[in-house]
Amino acid sequence: MSSSPKIMVFRLREIVYTLVLAFLSILLILCLVWMFKEKGNDSALTQSATNESQNTTDTVQKNTDATETASVEATPASSGTGNYIAGVYTSPLVLGDSSVDVQVTVDSDKIKAIELVNLSEATEASYPLVISSFDNLVSQIIEKQKLDGITCSTQNRYTSQLLLNAISNALKTAQTPFDS
C-alpha cells in the first residue's frame, strides 16, 4: 500500500468567500435570535394582558346577566340638544394599530348622521363588537338627539364608552362657542 500524502491547495479567493459566507450566516442567525427574543417578550406581555382581560370578562359574565344593560356616559361633558355649526366633524378613534374616524354630520339644531370612516376589514375582524355597539349607540343618539341616557349591553360597555367618547369629541367641535 502506498501512502501518498494528499495535498489540498486552497486558493485565497475560496478562503475569503468561505469566511464572508460564515460571517453573514452568523450575523443572520444573531439577527433572527434578537428579533424573535424581542417578539417573545411582547407576545408574553400581550398574552398576559389577554388572559387578564379574559378573566375579568369571565368574572363579569358570571356576576351579571348577559341581557342586562348599563348606562354609559361620555367622559367630556355630555352634549344635549343644542346649537351646532352645521357641517361634518370627525374625531379619531385608535383601535390597536389602526386609526378609525368617527364622522358626525349635524345641522344647526339636529344630529343628522354618525358614521365610522376608514374602518378596514382587518380592524373590523379584530374588534367584532365595534360595529354592533356603534349601531346601537347611533340609533339611540339619533332618536334622543343627545348623549345623555344612552344604554348598552354590559358585554359592550367598554367598547360603547370608547365610541361614545369619540362621538362626544366630534360634537364638542360642532357646538357653537357660546354653548361650551
Image: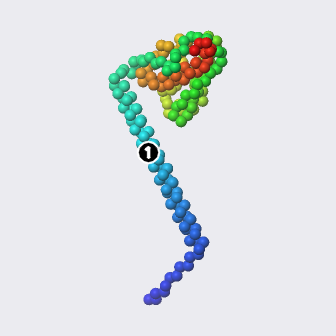
From the image, tell me which residue sits under label 1.
41
- Using a 10 Å C-alpha cutoff, classify the residue at mark 1 as few (fewer than 14 neighbours), some (14 to 19) or many (20 or more): few
Q: Residue at x 45, y 43 (%)?
A: 42
Identify whether 14 is placed above or below 82: below
Viewer-nearest residue: 63 or 149: 149
Res 132 visible? no
Identify whether 117 is placed above or below 26: above
Q: Is residue 171 left or right of residue 49?
A: right
Residue 2 x %, y %: 46, 89
Q: Quadrant of the C terminus?
A: top right
Q: Residue at x 36, y 20 (%)?
A: 65
Res 75 visible? yes
Identify whether 47 is placed above or below 136: below
The number of numbered discs placed on residues in the rendered structure image is 1
Q: Is residue 75 left or right of residue 86?
A: left
Residue 170 x %, y %: 58, 21
Amino acid tagged 1: Asn
